[in-house]
């Protein structure tokens, strides 16, 4: 099974309306071309980021890190929606689903 991370990363980046270069800048990569190449390699699955880098990318993109690893489309959507809720709304949602 292939990792869902490449597709999710690209989707999250596009949702955030960022180019690979802009994401690279947000992540603080010094060399613009090297940073953009790294993002490209993550999005194609040629290389995989470690968890710390995945977390940093998720934070920069405004998505939960779990979204990047979610292998189910509906659950990934739910993660995005839930991440935008307040703590109270999230508590109420969890309670209503229990």
Image: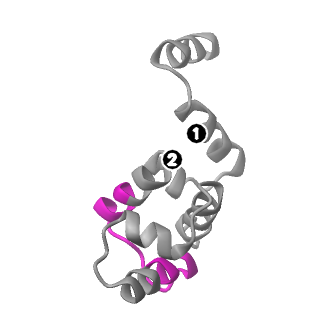
Above or below for 35 versus 73: below
Q: Nearer the viewer, residue 53 or 17?
A: 17
**SS of the residue under disc 2:** loop
Q: Label 2 crowding class (10 Å Cα cut-off): few <14, some 14-19, many 20+?
A: many
Above or below for 24 versus 63: below
- Marks 2 and 1 sit apart, C-alpha to C-alpha, by 8 Å
Q: Residue at x 36, y 55 (%)?
A: 55
Q: Position of residue 17 (x, y in %)?
A: 62, 59
Going from the N terminus, do you reach mark 2 or mark 1 first? 2
Which image quarter is the C terminus in? top right
**Which residue is labeled 2 in the image?**
63
Which image quarter is the N terminus in? bottom right
Q: Residue at x 46, y 18 (%)?
A: 87
Q: Are marks 2 and 1 in contact (CB under 8 Å)?
A: yes
The part of the chain drawn in magenta is 39-56
Magenta-drawn stretch contains 43: yes
Q: Position of residue 96 (x, y in %)?
A: 63, 11
Q: Position of residue 33 (x, y in %)?
A: 41, 88
Q: Nearer the viewer, residue 37 or 46?
A: 37
**Which residue is labeled 1 in the image?**
79
Q: Nearer the viewer, mark 2 or mark 1?
A: 2
Q: Residue at x 57, y 81 (%)?
A: 44
Magenta-drawn stretch contains 53: yes
């Amino acid at each position: 099974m292939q990792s869902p991370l490449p597709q999710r990363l690209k989707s999250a980046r596009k949702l955030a309306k960022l180019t690979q270069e802009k994401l690279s800048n947000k992540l603080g990569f010094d060399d613009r071309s090297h940073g953009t190449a790294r993002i490209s390699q993550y999005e194609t699955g040629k290389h995989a980021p470690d968890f710390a880098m995945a977390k940093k990318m998720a934070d920069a993109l405004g998505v939960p890190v779990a979204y990047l690893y979610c292998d189910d489309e509906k659950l990934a959507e739910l993660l995005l929606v839930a991440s935008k809720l307040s703590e109270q709304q999230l508590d109420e949602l969890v309670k209503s689903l229990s």
